Amino acid sequence: MFSKPIFKQSIKTNWKLWAIITIVASVILSGFIIGYDAAGYASIATAAEGTAFSSLLSSMDSLLGNLENFYKLIALILGIVYVVFTANTLVVSKVDSGSMAYTLSTPIKRSSVIFTKSLYLILSVILMYVIVSLAGLGASQLQYNNVTGYPITEDIEKASETLDKSEGYLSEHLYLIKDNEQAMRDAAEARDMDLDAYSIYLGEVIKDHSYEEAAEIITDERWDIYEDDDDMEDDDIEITTEELIENPAMILTSNDALTAGASVQGISVNEYRQFLADEITALEAEKNEENKEKSQPNDELLLQAVIDSSAKALNMNSAQVEDNLILIKDSTALEASMKATDLNEEQIITMANHAMVSSARSVDAALEFDTETYFWLSLGLLILILAMSSVSFFASTLFNRSGLALAIGGGIPFAFFLLTMVQQLMDDAPVILEYLTITTLFDTDAILASGEFGWGLVALGTIAFVLYAASNVIFTKKDLPL
């Protein structure tokens, strides 16, 4: 079935377009990743709420969410351009020009010709998006170190210079920053925080890292225990960082988890035990605390009132204070805020610290890289492009004229793309649009939210398989104008 000469000819004819599309897609994806500004995009997304672009920008509060527009729009259109023109070049253009007659006059069977050409298109698409995906992984790792380790943020970059340590090493040993006063000052300045707020922030990050390491060890231990237990689901066996944050007492049951957590904290196992005991006591006290009347919306309104009053007292606009919350602690600003809100100085400083820490943690969360989610985004895009290519290839084998094949084989995929554009730009797009394009089967929202998306990818794979199979049958049996 496979013809090596036909395959080589297909490569020779189409490699330039393949290389151009692959390079362009890789560069654009890398640019999306390298140029990502977590804090900046969050502000833009907030400002765009209620506009026609809100659906496009709402996901930009995370690195992978920011890539959604690349996968749904840019990578899709680039892939469509490649498969439409390549499918046309592989079959119908050769029939139209008469060169197919020469090919079929050789001992190579017609079934081998069409099978090899379809195999070339499939493999070229797969190779293209494997390279593009690897380029994205490389860009994220080089820029943020977040594929194989913890994200490297501005404070780590600055502290690494002060401590003369590598950024990657320091991201896994943050206690070194905490143990050095000058490193603390430099790191705090890099994150636009004062020492008080940065100390709180760093303590929370180190604690979460210790819980994350402990969660992996406890999960591995549970796998050893329940691997052959059919009554236990994978989610029941896995212990997450969030579960340990809510119940740190679970760490006390594993010596290896205690050792790993203590290592992240830079303290002894006994000291880490005491740390966990203090955390457990604090959590119990928080649960037992009563009469908490303030809700989150009221907290946000109070913070905005503090920002506005501080800005007025300092002869600045609110946006400037919001971008540099340290200004709230200025004596003049504090006095104005106390008058405006009836809060005391300690409450306002606590609120400012909380706001700075929350903002910094949001940036950290935005830079986290979930390799499983990235894999499914990449695989989903690949299957979608293969489904698009099957439409173009089917048209290329169905018709004998290039113009008609391009109109159908290119028109349908481009129509799907335009419908996707409309859906992305409209917050209240008609529901019927979802059923007029196969791109909705590639549900990036569900992938990013760890929802149900598998059946959509299966459907796309089925479309690709059926149309490629039909193309082979049609071309083998049809009458050609030879």
Image (cartoon, helix red, strand yellow):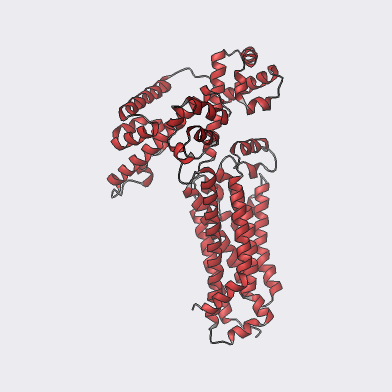
Indicate left or right for 23 with 450 as reference: right
Is 105 located above or below residue 462 in the figure?
below
Residue 16 percent location from the top left of the image: 63, 67
Residue drawn where x is 64% and y is 45% of the image: 56
Indicate left or right for 34 with 284 as reference: right
Say how many tags the image has.
0
Residue drawn where x is 68% and y is 79% of the image: 96
The quadrant holding residue 346 is top right
The quadrant holding residue 308 is top right
Residue 296 percent location from the top left of the image: 55, 25
Farthest residue, direction front = 164
Residue 155 percent location from the top left of the image: 53, 33
Residue closest to the eye, 481 or 321? 321
Indicate left or right for 275 with 48 as reference: left
Indicate left or right for 389 with 281 as reference: right
Quadrant where the C terminus is found in the figure: bottom right
Q: Is residue 63 visible?
A: yes
Is 78 located above or below residue 222 in the figure?
below
Q: Is residue 434 visible?
A: no
Residue 232 percent location from the top left of the image: 32, 46
Residue drawn where x is 30% and y is 27% of the image: 270
Is 318 located above or below residue 104 in the figure?
above
Residue drawn where x is 54% and y is 67% of the image: 122
